[in-house]
Structure formats: C-alpha cells, structure tokens
Image (spheres, grey):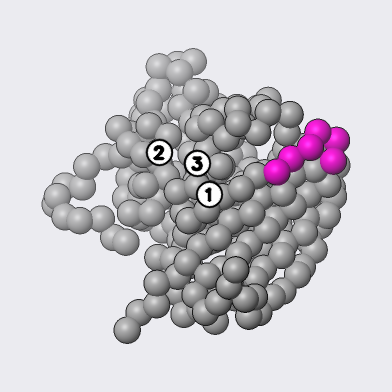
Amino acid sequence: MSVEILHDKRNMTAAVTGEIDHHAAADIRITIDGELERTTPEVLTFDMSGVTFMDSSGVGLVLGRARAMKQWGGKVRIKDPSARAEKILKMSGLGSLITPRPDGKERKK
Amino acid sequence: MRPVTNQMKMTIAGYSKNEALARMCVSAFAAQLDPTVEEINDIKAAVSEAVTNCIVHGYRDTIGDIDIKLRVIGDDTLYIKISDKGVGIADVRQAMQPMFTTSPDGERAGLGFAVMESFTDTLKVRSKPGKGTAVTMTKTLHRRG
C-alpha cells in the first residue's frame, strides 16, 4: 500500500495504491491527516483507481476524513473506485461522494 | 450432510498486519475450487472483515490468537470458521445491524457483518461475553465451464 498526496490550489488528492484494510488504513490515515491539518483544503479527493482490494475499512477511512473536514467546511470526493469498492461504498451510503466518470463508461471490475 | 473433502486449520496472532496474511491463506485454500476472480474477491473481503473484527473488537486491548478453520464440503462449497477468545458480543443481533459500531475512534464504518453477509451464502455468528466469538461462513462456488 502507498498513498501519494497532490495539492492543486484548495483541492487535495490522495491517490491510494494497493490494498485498503484495517492495517493499511491506519498508515493512510496518518499521512492524509497530517496534510489535511496543514492545508485545510476545500475538497479532498480519494483517487481509488490504484486500489486492488478494499474492505469496510476503506469506508471508515473516508467517513473519518469527511467528519474531520466538517470543521472547516471541506468536502470529500471519491474518484474511480473499482466496481467492488463501489459496492461497499454504496452499502454505507457513500455512493453520492463518487465523482461521475467524464466519459460515462462502465467502471472497471 | 455432504462430506468434508479437504480441510485446513491455522492460528494467527491478532496483529493487524496478519489481516492480509489471512486473506492470502484462505484464497490459496479456496483456489482448489477453481473460483472466479469475483468469487475470490468476495472471499477475501469476508475474511478480512471477520479477522478485523477479532482484532478490533474481540482483542481490543490485547493481542490474542485467531483460529481459522477451512473446509471443502462436497466438491463446490467452501466453509470458513474464524474465531477468537476475546471479549465476545453481548447482543449479536445489534452488532449485526449495518452501521452499528462500538469503535470509539469513529474510524470503523460498522459494516463488517454486512459485507460478510453480502459476499457469502450463509453467515452464522456465535458469541459469549467473556468467552469469544465464532463466525462461520459458507460459499458455494459456481464453477466455470
């Protein structure tokens, strides 16, 4: 697992690569939270295109960051989850945070 | 009752780094049933949730053993039992409600059982406060070709 942070003005992207489980989520959280506190972005986008496995810890990760960002009115978005990750995100009602794909194509399995 | 045609037992220490190990071992055992990629991913997610529950809830402030018992039933069904000797669950029905969590740090979604339920065919949870929790799941794999 690795997470790469990109800043573009008031938008921050966290590109996660590899597996998101409870163990990995703890490290991802530390990296992201450090950057969030430092920059208080308007939008945090989780780029999930590189995620190969995700369980409900991924949902907890997104929920926790969304809660933290409420302090300054920031919002969370989710980009390019796999069909499987999307299923888990939708179970938790986080489906509305997923940004629509610009080409409107089917998501990768 | 269909016969048990293969089995495996393993015990892992309840360190969170072993969540990935548990997923890998169970999917390696399941490989003999020639599962689809989709089915393997279902199994990995369900196992990950069950093992995480043992670590996060069963052994909240300690590190304990997690027993994983695997069986092939007949020629197409995988049986998985994951158990701990942790604190147990007083109200299993409540614990299984989606979004219910006792996690104090707000980092758990409360979806563990919901994921297990949706990605396997049967799910049974037995728990006794102070004794531990056992989760039993079965999944029939639909062979290709």
Q: Residues within 10 Å of mark 2 (few under 14, many from 20)?
A: some
Residue A7 versus residue A47 in the image, above or below? above
Q: Residue at x 52, y 79 (%)?
A: B75
B2 above or below B85? below
Q: Between tags 1 and 2, which lies in front? A: 1
Q: As rendered, which of B142 and A50 lies closer to the eye?
A: B142
Q: Which residue is mark 1?
A: B116
**Vertical placement of B8 versus B13: above or below?**
below
Which residue bears the numbered disc 3? Answer: B114
Element on which disc 1 rests = helix
User: Please, what is the three-letter code of the amino acid marked with disc 3?
Assistant: Ala
Q: Marks 1 and 2: CB-CB under 8 Å?
A: no
Inter-mark Cα distance, 1 to 2: 12 Å
Q: Which mark is residue A41?
A: none
Chain letter for the residue marked with disc 2 in the picture: A
Seen as rendered, the residue at the extreme front is B1
Q: Type of residue at label 1?
A: Met
- Seen in the image, is B73 located left or right of residue A8? right
Q: Are marks 1 and 3 in contact (CB under 8 Å)?
A: yes
Q: Residue furthest bottom?
A: B145
Residue B7: say if magenta: no
Q: Label 1, label 3: how many angstroms apart (C-alpha)?
A: 6 Å
- Magenta span of residues: B126-131
In front: mark 3 or mark 2?
Answer: 3
Q: What is the chain identity of the residue bearing mark 1?
A: B
Quarter of the image that includes the N terminus of chain A: bottom right
Q: x, y percentage for residue B126?
A: 70, 43
Q: Secondary structure at mark 2?
A: helix
Amino acid type shown at disc 2: Met
Helix, strand or loop at disc 3? helix
Identify the residue under disc 2.
A91
